[in-house]
Amino acid sequence: MGRASLPLSCNAILEKRTLLLKRIAFISVHGCPMAVLGTRSAGGMNVYIRALAQGLGRQGFAVDIFTRCHGSDEPLVNPLDANTRVIHIDAGPEDAPKEDLFNYCPAFLQGVNAFAGSNGLHYELLHSHYWLSGWVGQALSQEWRVPHVATFHTLAEIKTRARVGEAEATSRSATERQVVGAVDRVIVSTGHERLALQQLYDAPEDKVRVVFGGVDLDLFHPGDQRAARDRLGLNGHQTILYVGRLDPIKGVDVLMHTLSQIETCRDVQLLVVGGNTDDAESRRLRTLTGQLGLAGKVEFLGSQPHETLPDYYQAADVCVVPSYYESFGLVALEAMACGTPVVASRVAGLQAIVKDNRSGYLVAWHCPDAYADRLEVLLSNDALRHSMGKQARQAAVDMSWDRTAQGVAAVYAELGVRPQKG
Ligand code: UDP
């Protein structure tokens, strides 16, 4: 596979600049921070990895993010900023389905090793993201004799319990268990996930640390709703927003049924940001829209660049996150940072972000009646919506990525790895 490499001089400058910094290797087999978000499996994990790596860079680490190559014209080394870069490793076909990726992990492991060896790089610590990377990280940490920290983002044992019909690779749960047993620390986003790790994976309590995810407060901030609507060319109807991948676990069908209940009494529209027209779930949801007589009320906008999302959050009256499982739920936090109230399912991650009756509502049942009830209350009361939006923003300002990076750096420090003092 022919790929463009950065000019040597450019690599050399970066190398020199980060020479004095402590190096961290992020392993992210399938979550490339440069992937198009909201499609296939690219979403919150990709955003998290990029933002955390850059946050750690600001703390004084140099972070290399190793991920699978997913396009033949991608450079091998891609600087994100002065201290952070993405390294694309050839391991398996570019379009290999996620279910097959475990087969390519040995090749990925070899690729990371070869890159580190040929560039004379020593990493102080490995931080793996998702179970596939946990497997790679564990093998590398034994070889390099450095500490290994794992963040799973989602766990098979919780996912399969969350929604009937969710199937996971048989090797996933067993590998997660092995990694939990072997790593030095596991970082989770919420106390709920820590409890699940202890109960379902026998994780020792002193191995697990809770560090909240974050939001880019420079990008996601409140703004004039009418101006945002004008920029997006929206009509005057009240607007419900969904943002995210289109995957059955996201519960977007519940939102469609909800809309069919409330649209009889209100002029509302639903904007769906994320997904590809050729996704199976996207096709299913479009068909459902027709069956429910909602054509003209629902707009499928496909995946949108992350930087444009503030316009959507600012334009919306309410953002709905009806997921069956969410280990954290960045979309809820981004909406809140833009001053938009959130109606979300009462599941682990979302429960930690959205405060019921303050920054929005949590809905206990995946049932359209319950969502319709909460949306009706919000959409019919401007003052309530504005006050909840204000409280949402206030809650979000405490959750910057720098704070997340500080929390993660504290976990590294427990393992004797500290940033270089400037
Ligand atoms: N996102 C995006 N463009 C889209 C759809 C989603 O940038 O078209 C981003 C969104 O802003 C959020 C992430 O993808 O940062 C989704 O994260 P979340 O934790 O809500 O869901 P996950 O993908 O982890 O299930």
Image: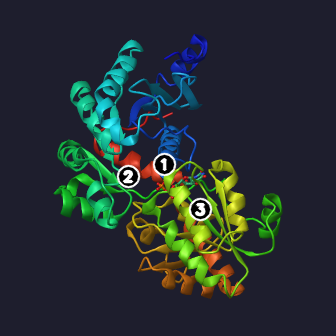
**Residue matched to label 3:** 286
First in sequence: mark 2 vs mark 3: 2
Is residue 388 left or right of 26 when viewed as pictured? right
Mark 1 and ligand 1: say if the CB distance to the nearest ligand atom is below 8 Å: yes
Q: Residue at x 27, y 55 (%)?
A: 208
Q: Which mark is residue 153?
A: 2
Rate crowding at label 3 as few (under 14), some (14 to 19) or many (20 or more) other CA atoms within 10 Å: some
The one nearer the camera, 247 or 32, is: 247
Residue 188 in picture, x, y percent from top left: 34, 56
Q: Secondary structure at mark 2?
A: loop
Going by the numbered disc 1, the residue's amino acid type is: Tyr
From this view, report whether residue 263 is shown above or below residue 342.
below
Do tag 2 and tag 1 residues touch (Cβ < 8 Å)? yes
**Residue matched to label 1:** 48
Q: Secondary structure at mark 1?
A: helix
Q: Nearer the viewer, mark 2 or mark 3?
A: 3
Residue 175 is at least partly visible in this image:
yes
Residue 235 in picture, x, y percent from top left: 81, 70
* Rendering quarter of residue 292: bottom right
Q: Tell me which image quadrant ligand 1 sits in.
A: bottom right
Do tag 2 and tag 3 residues touch (Cβ < 8 Å)? no
Is residue 104 left or right of 380 when viewed as pictured? left
The one nearer the camera, 261 or 27, is: 261
Residue 311 in picture, x, y percent from top left: 72, 59
First in sequence: mark 2 vs mark 1: 1
Residue 122 is at least partly visible in this image:
no
Mark 2 and ligand 1: say if the CB distance to the nearest ligand atom is below 8 Å: yes
First in sequence: mark 3 vs mark 1: 1
The one nearer the camera, 60 or 73, is: 73
